[in-house]
Image (tube, coloured by chain):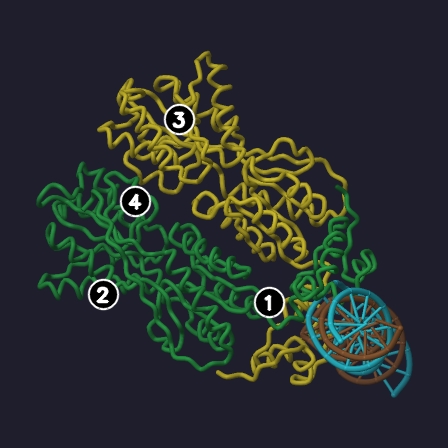
Chain colours: A green, B yellow, C cyan, D brown
Amino acid sequence: MTKPQIHTMEELSAAIGVSRPTLSRYFQDPAKVSRSSVERIRRGLEKVDYTPNFFATRMNRKTTGMIGVIIPYLNDLFFTRLLESIERAAMSAGYTVITQCSHSDPKIEMRAAETFLSMSVDGAIVAPLGNHSDLGVYERLNARLPFVLMDSRPKSLTDVDFIGTDHVQSTGMITEYLCRVGGPPVFLAMPRVNFNARERENAYIAKMQELGFEPVVIGTEEIRPDWHFEAHGRAVLDQHFSKGQLIESSILCANDRVAIGALRAAAQHGLEPGARRRGGLRIAGHDDYPLCPFTTPALTTIAQDVTEIGQAAVDRLLEKLRAENTTENQVIMLIDGTLKIRESA
Amino acid sequence: MTKPQIHTMEELSAAIGVSRPTLSRYFQDPAKVSRSSVERIRRGLEKVDYTPNFFATRMNRKTTGMIGVIIPYLNDLFFTRLLESIERAAMSAGYTVITQCSHSDPKIEMRAAETFLSMSVDGAIVAPLGNHSDLGVYERLNARLPFVLMDSRPKSLTDVDFIGTDHVQSTGMITEYLCRVGGPPVFLAMPRVNFNARERENAYIAKMQELGFEPVVIGTEEIRPDWHFEAHGRAVLDQHFSKGQLIESSILCANDRVAIGALRAAAQHGLEPGARRRGGLRIAGHDDYPLCPFTTPALTTIAQDVTEIGQAAVDRLLEKLRAENTTENQVIMLIDGTLKIRESA
DNA sequence: AAAGTATTTTTACATGCGTTAAACTTAGAG
DNA sequence: CTCTAAGTTTAACGCATGTAAAAATACTTT
């Protein structure tokens, strides 16, 4: 199993008796080389240990076959599912995905963007940080690469493509559902780590007004924008429940992780949120976090179509990537959420 | 804000009046250039838009400043936490992490390894797939790079460094705890997606025998080795509970995600697992999944020191990386778990 | 001001492969 | 058996930077 190691194409050329340009063409696309040469090269490669140098190949091609992806936070199954979907879509299109996580730090996000530029990735997909991040990063990427934003949208960028869930539709739909089956819901906000936080909040308010109810938003005092969503949800509701407030309300949480914290607070106060009892406590979330079917009670929520979002982002990127220099208009694709009625509301 | 774009160092050299070799030295380490030149270059860079070409720089240096990391599965907060810990450790040591996910597919894992080799990363850290994967991949990486395995250990590799939790200690400790506070536990196995599955199972059996109890392992019939742990835990216990079995047992789950499914099955059967009642149902897990404090009841478990494992893996890698060609012995670092007593057991 | 040292510039070669043009083989058609 | 087209080899240049040696310059020190 100790095949001789070969480091350059030149050596390989000497070792198997095929010229270097032919090898070069072979590695780019075996179809560009005659049947007999392909056989000969293939047999030769079995006898030695050689892989083309990644940098040298990439440096000279016009296309690198890589697309860069930045996500803001790793420890959240929503983003990992999104990432998985992107990786699968990109892989099946023959691209290599380079992932960077900005760890909720604008400086890291910026550095990741620079890395992508210096690696001349063929395109980039970014799930942006929230208000903190400098929008210039996205504009810069957008100006220099095929570029798509995803998941969370800075509305002020009128030139950048976006793929994500239609929060007006999704949040509106579950708000309406809650109004119909129980009382008009209170909205438990999430820490404002990205643009979605506000967007969902506003979608809730708009729908409530449309239905003629008074919107009530809680959980916004703590402006500490960290990703400990469960702890946030639990803390906010614990405070209310301790004062005997909200114990018979419908509570719409800005996302499922907040809702999981909310369920916990309820349990600690001996409350049993549920869809069945008329007028009792109801808790609902947003996203369809993979754990929703396993909470007690199982969490009613709105599913974001993660697979579709990832696939659509890659599709759109590839489209831009192939249509060189075509001055196109901004594409904004908003994907509907799906109501998942379980037990909690 | 539309600075002129400059693509090569040569151009940059002309633009700001400093020779190319000096610029080259500057970009590698500003300290290698005189104070005055640094100032001059810095001012020049503010006026233009230039980033050194990633490939060209990497191609000629002996060191690329990159380390490759492969994890088997993305949608699991254990791995994302591990990854985060590695990224932080590597970043603070000045390295760039390139992450690849093998998506439980040995072929993808192998391709990722080849990518790392062709990119001449300075070192690689891999959390391996289970029995399915070809151990040759790890041997190959180990032979050609500073290399460390992590999380799950193929014992047959006697030449590869490993960092992970000491499952004999961790599983033993919680087994002992369960025996002490309740009845001797039954072990609810996890799908055998990696070597840890068996290792924990064996550690449980050994400890039970040591304590003079009869080990009982359930959940091994379904050999479908997928990552739907919660569904697995729920299905297995649902079967037992339906027959009235195990409803007053202590159940040690192979990991927290299985335990979350177990809690769900219990709730569906109207059972309330808990530490308080003598002789009642108890459920415990392993890993300290971030959601453990938020389940109902909060899950008693063993915490793996994820931060420490990631840091240690990077430390060990850097150590090997700096000590060139030193023929060293295999290093195996097993880190203790910590008992987290909550409500469920 | 002269001598000595620290930096920088010049010059030239190296990295591993993409790419092109011209010369050369080979196989199939007539 | 000659002609032709397809494919291959040879030869040479390019990519954007690293790196090393020698020459030139700037800065200190006495």
* Vertical placement of residue B300 versus A295, above or below: above
Disc 4 designates what residue? A292
Tag 3 subunit: B
Neighbour class for label 1 at 10 Å: few (<14), some, many (≥20)? some
Provide the secondary structure element on which disc 2 rests. Answer: helix
- Between A260 and D22, which is closer to the camera in this rendering? A260
Q: CA distance from mark 1 to mark 3?
A: 49 Å
Residue B252 appears in which quarter of the rendering? top left
* Vertical placement of residue B241 versus A345, above or below: above
Provide the secondary structure element on which disc 1 rests. Answer: loop
* Vertical placement of residue B34 versus B61, above or below: below
Query: Label 2 near label 3: C-beta < 8 Å?
Result: no
Q: What amino acid is labelled 2 in the image? A: Asn
Circles 4 and 3 on the same chain? no
Tag 1 subunit: A
Tag 2 subunit: A
Earlier residue among tags 2 and 4: 2
Q: What amino acid is labelled 4 in the image? A: Cys
Q: CA distance from mark 2 to mark 4?
A: 24 Å
Closer to the observer: label 1 or label 3?
Answer: 1
Circles 2 and 4 on the same chain? yes
Disc 2 designates what residue? A202
Disc 1 designates what residue? A64
Residue B271 appears anywhere in the view? yes
What quarter of the picture does the N terminus of chain A occupy? top right
Q: What amino acid is labelled 1 in the image? A: Thr
